[in-house]
Image (cartoon, helix red, strand yellow):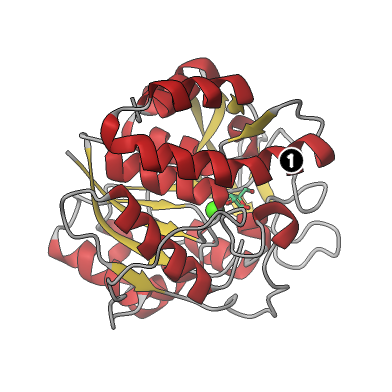
Amino acid sequence: KHQLILDVDTGIDDAFAILYALKSQHIHVEGICTGFGNTDVAQATDNTLRLIKLANPGYDVPVAPGASGPLERKWGGPVVHVHGDNGIGNAELPPSSQSPLDESAADFIIRKANEQPGEMILVTLGSLTNLALALEKDPSIGGKFKNVVMMGGTVFSHGNVTPVAEANFHVDPEAAALVFKSGLPLTMVGLDVTLQAKLRMQQLDWLDRNARQDCREVVEFLRASLAYYFNFYTQVNDFIDACPLHDPLALLVAVDPSLVKIQTLKAEIECSGSLTSGMVVTDRRPHPLRGSDVNVCLEVNAERAIGKLVTGFI
Ligand code: BDR
Ligand code: CA
């Protein structure tokens, strides 16, 4: 089984990714770190605990609460227009009796990296703040992850919070910059590919009719939660009865890189531009001089990816 640590800002699409991972026979979720982004860290933590209860994976999944804001900047607050008042599209879930760990997300990341060096894949679905804090505290973890797969950024596509920046990097550019310079093996699943991975309403209807017994409630939740997301993407983004599954695609790539075409590019993060803060700057000159090697996903077999995500619940 793939041993994954998820770092999330639970979020509608984070929720989909978490549920997919917890329901997969091929994935063991070693723990979930939470942070701010789509919602605040307390809400992200609470949502995550409720999702674990809903998925009932049959093993313990510790939840480590992380950063409540960016390394150096002031946080703008929850993204209610995209993810609803509670982060999960105002869908309701029963509370969980599980408590979060006393250990911080950064400490959890450090501990896991040291316990089983070279084994863990860290999948970041929110800002890179927790990972940056872990690296500041223990830079040696740079060599101890099998891979770090990040949902974030854009190279040839456009941004989503600004013309050139994607939300997860834009919300804490200093953290992203630190991670890019860390020497960690990095795979970037950005808007270049996630905007191609569109879930259509009909596919969700089909899933609803075909969900396996132990996923019925999960799928019911997904429908309720995704309704908000469909609405946002239809109104604001020229998507017709469809929405992109950013975070679920990153999770899939972590366990099945054959879904994407990857190019290793030298990349760094812009932190100070007045128009370009949080932008991924790649040095594509014939003899690049700047940046660190990042495996950037540039093409995706979207049909196969969405097919895998949907069939994960049937
Ligand atoms: C990313 O930002 C968040 O809104 C989503 O959960 C996803 O991780 C997309 O830019
Ligand atoms: Ca997210």
**Residue that carries the numbered disc 1 in the rendered image:** 231
Question: What is the three-letter code of the residue carrying label 1?
Answer: Asn
Closer to the camera in the image, 200 or 291: 200
Query: Residue lying furthest bottom in this view?
Result: 102
**Rendered image quadrant of residue 36:** bottom right
Using residue 116 as the reference point, say whether residue 131 is left or right of it: right
Residue 113 placement (x, y as % from top left): 23, 62
**Residue 32, relative to residue 312: is it above or below?**
below
**Is residue 62 or residue 142 the one in the foreground?**
62
Quadrant holding the N terminus? top left
Helix, strand or loop under label 1: helix
| Residue toward you, 10 or 300 | 10
Instruction: Look at the image and tell me whether residue 260 can be seen.
Output: no
Q: Position of residue 93 (x, y in %)?
A: 45, 58
Name the residue: 18% across, 66% down: 114
Is the CB atom of the residue marked by disc 1 within 8 angstroms of ligand 1's nearest atom? no
Relative side of 182 to 139, left or right:
right
Q: Position of residue 85 (x, y in %)?
A: 66, 64
Say if residue 233 shows up in the picture. yes
The residue at the point 38 percent across, 42 percent down is 217
Outermost right residue: 275
- In front of the other: 100 or 231: 231
Please determine whether, in this image, residue 190 is positioned above or below residue 37.
Answer: above
Q: Residue at x 65, y 55 (%)?
A: 83
